[in-house]
Image: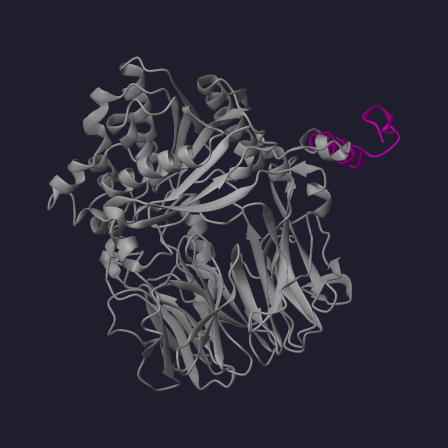
Amino acid sequence: MALGMISTKEGWPRRQEKIRRFRRVLLLAVVFSGTLWGQSHPFTVNDMVALDRLSDLQLSPDNRWIALTVRSTDLDADGGRTDLWVVSTGDGEKRRLTTHPDNDFSPRWSAQGEAIYFLSERSGSQQVWRILLDGGEAEQVTSLPLDVENLLVAPNGRRLILSLEVFPDCADLDCTVKRSKEQSQSLGAGRIFDRLFVRHWDRWKDGRRSHVFLYSLEDGKVLDLMAGMDADCPSKPFGGPEEIAISPDGNWIVFTARNAGREEAWSTDFDLYAVPTDGSSPPRCLTDENPAWDTQPVFSPDGTRLAYLAMTRPGFESDRYRVMVRSWPEGKSEELAPKWDRSPSNLTWTPDGRYLLATADHLGRHPLFRLDARSGHVAIIEEGGSVDSPAAGSNRVYFLRDDLSHPSDVYSATLDGDGLTQLTSFNRDHLADIRMGRTEQFTFSGWNGETVYAWMVEPVDCREGRKYPVAFLIHGGPQSSFGDHFHYRWNSQVYAGAGYGVVMVDFHGSTGYGQAFTDSISGDWGGKPLEDLKIGLETALARYPWMDGDRVAALGASYGGYMINWIAGNQPDRFRCLVNHDGVFDQRSMYFSTEELWFPEWEQGGPYWENPETYEKHNPARFVDRWRTPMLVIHGGRDFRVPLDQGVSAFTALQRRGIPSRFLYFPDENHWVVKPRNSIQWHEVVLDWLARWTAGGGGSQSD
């Protein structure tokens, strides 16, 4: 119905809703215009924002169904809207289970598999709801005075495991509600802190902690299993239900927490704690012998073994995770596959207890691995692309998979890695008329002659005999990877669709190439990585004659943004322009303003006052006198990891030196840009900047 056709006889609330629907359709029509009219076109940021995003795959007890969360774009609300879907493991038939306007997410199967528990905001707060597999109306399960943050279902089906944010010294939930209200109604707006953290990621601390609770479905009673602990589980800001495990007999819960007291801001000493579900004794530390990170506990199906991940070096968040297994309830932890030089995640058991499954970065990809739980033998089940959320059935393993050219979908394979089957094509209609660039991985001899891996993406419709500008993308971390993954903030196909060739180098410090390779960047931020980047770019230019070496732009975020600032002073004449998102500008001020101090202390060899030489050796602020390359600086106002002043300082330096520059500020974003409208604006501004200095995307006739 057109806006002018809305009846004036309808009630005002209904008229408002129709107006909102019309606006939503209009906005989506603008975003999806190429697809709506069946016009084939290169991939754009609008296409990327429009895609459905799959997460949190959960296999039903009878192995017949998969539940998952699907996020779609709601431009009207400027956010993502999440719903629950179920997929048949037999034929891939998919069905949308929830359609409520509010977000539904975190599906967890009931013990018998006839229903799904999930989290939803439908009641005005985030609570647990339940819906039958066959559909129908969902029913609210919890009505707690606090938002429920995480959800697990106990094996007997009579209890739920939840996480709630509470004041750790409060005896009940009402105490937390009362104190929160008192804080909000205090006479002044000032806040007093006696220790770090004062803020973390994008939130100021207020004294509350995320605690694990047991909720009885029979009488609605809640029990704080971490009562009195001044610690979080799940950990902040990225921990989830993978940090909590319940034994198959339902008698024990094992969880991850860092109980570090005043040292929290510079400690990575996360431990596993075991607590009886009847609350008869306080949590007992299982890993106090290890001063480094222990996490992701998972019980074997028969309850006789506990597997988990452990680092060995305190203070280093990018140390290699080792797979540990111990007998339950008492036993000594032993490392499984000690010679496997990869750092796994997504740890889970097969139903027969014979294998553990895990994913890990590996040579520019993120495959699915199988570990023999007795011998430690490691094999790859699925090597291509990036795998997430593996779940093992009786005969097959199910998982989400994506790659540089395809967003995530549900796949299955045998435990031997045979018979890979794609079960869903959630974005088939969105992608039907979209053209993407060809991708290719290549290697070269980087620093010290060591092999370095990289990816290339061709511009869409790349034509022989033409030259194309290059977008040189530099990953953050720095211990991470720009691999075979469909990224929603740094998606190479957006640049390929705009007419740019893309080069991404996994320089020294990247993950997936052995721990020694990852370690090599610490204390040498501006050394080996820059040499790899230089050699990698020149290798790509020689390998792909369609790349125009005179029209190259370099872009990066976080550590990648640091590298942009470092390049500005140490390779000032190589690039036509630079893009720096949330990058470190001044190592000294960064140390004293960031939140997780263990990161700079490990990377630079201690606190600033103990080792200022390392901080200053690779400090971009020292080389501002050499800056002359045009730079776009972008920063989020809620970024406490690399605080806003780092971006403002870089822009100040550029402006004071008279260098062409722009500053894009997002007051409502943190270290990442995640809101759909902001993402579209981000890409439009970035691509406009690149076009301005590289004479636009697209090919030019070669000489």
Question: Where does residue 130 sit, x and y in percent of width and height?
Answer: 67, 65
Question: Where does residue 102 sit, x and y in percent of width and height?
Answer: 66, 49
Nearer to me, 575 or 616? 575
Q: Quadrant of residue 505?
A: top left
* Image point (53%, 59%), residue name: 387
Q: Quadrant of the N terminus?
A: top right
Can residue 24 be seen in this snapshot? no
Can residue 355 be seen in this snapshot? yes
Nearer to me, 279 or 75? 75
Question: Where does residue 523 sit, x and y in percent of width and height?
Answer: 20, 46
Q: Is residue 493 above or below residue 247?
A: above
Q: Quadrant of residue 34?
A: top right
Is residue 16 left or right of 265 when viewed as pictured? right
Residue 24 colored in magenta in the image:
yes
Nearer to me, 639 or 121? 639
Is residue 219 left or right of 232 when viewed as pictured? right
Give the image's coloring scheme: one colour
Q: Which residues are magenta?
A: 1-29
* Image point (11%, 43%), residue name: 609
Is residue 497 left or right of 315 when viewed as pictured? right
Residue 105 colored in magenta in the image:
no
Q: Quadrant of residue 128?
A: bottom right
Question: Where does residue 483 sit, x and y in percent of width and height?
Answer: 45, 49
Is residue 256 left or right of 268 when viewed as pictured? right
Which residue is outermost to the top? 658
* Image point (73%, 52%), residue name: 99
Q: Is residue 419 above or below residue 284?
A: above
Name the main secondary structure of what is drawn in magenta: helix
